[in-house]
Amino acid sequence: MADERTHIDAECKKVLDEFMDALNQYDASAMDATMHFPHVRFAAGTVKVYEQPGSNPMDLFDRLKKEDDWKYSAWRTRELVQFNDRKAHYMLSYTRFRSDNSVIGVYQSLYALTFQDSRWGIQLRSSFGP
């Protein structure tokens, strides 16, 4: 079980890193490549379901750039809390930074990654961030 946990954790963290890289590059297609669909996002009291690739709205990032001078985000913590060979639950936190590297905020999240079509992908994100 420890070997399986280590393997799943490494594979999922690779996906999480790719997701964060894509987000910071403002690359919707690369973000889609790290997700499974339908993809669920629960944030700011709203549940949104992205049915297919290309449906992830980038207006959130436009707003963050305009209102908060958001430049990039970075993982603070990523803890695998539950898993089997088809699904992994992560307790996460991330920091959003302005263009001058000052902190906008630190946000807690829960992500569920699933193993489908021979790969791990993010299926659900629940965040206390906007």
Image: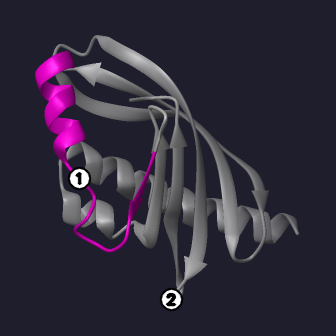
Viewer-closest of 36 and 79 = 36
Give the quarter of the image for residue 102.
Answer: top left
The three-letter amino acid code for the residue at tag 1 is Pro
The location of residue 90, given as percent across then percent down, is 65, 49
Query: Residue 44's mark?
Result: none
- Give the quadrant of the C terminus: top left
The three-letter amino acid code for the residue at tag 2 is Asp
Q: Are marks 1 and 2 in contact (CB under 8 Å)?
A: no
- Magenta range: 47-68
Q: How many marks?
A: 2
- Which marked residue is nearer to the observer: mark 1 or mark 2? 1
Q: From what the image shows, is residue 46 above or below residue 14?
A: above
On whether residue 65 falls in the magenta region, the answer is yes
* Residue found at x 49% / y 62%: 122
Is 51 placed left or right of 126 in the picture?
Answer: left
- Helix, strand or loop under label 2: loop
Viewer-closest of 23 and 5 = 23
Label 1: few (<14), some (14–19) or many (≥20) C-alpha neighbours in 10 Å: few
Question: Would you name the residue on which mark 2 appears?
Answer: 117
* Residue found at x 37% / y 55%: 19
- Give the quadrant of the N terminus: bottom right
Q: From what the image shows, is residue 73 above or below residue 123?
A: above
On whether residue 73 falls in the magenta region, the answer is no
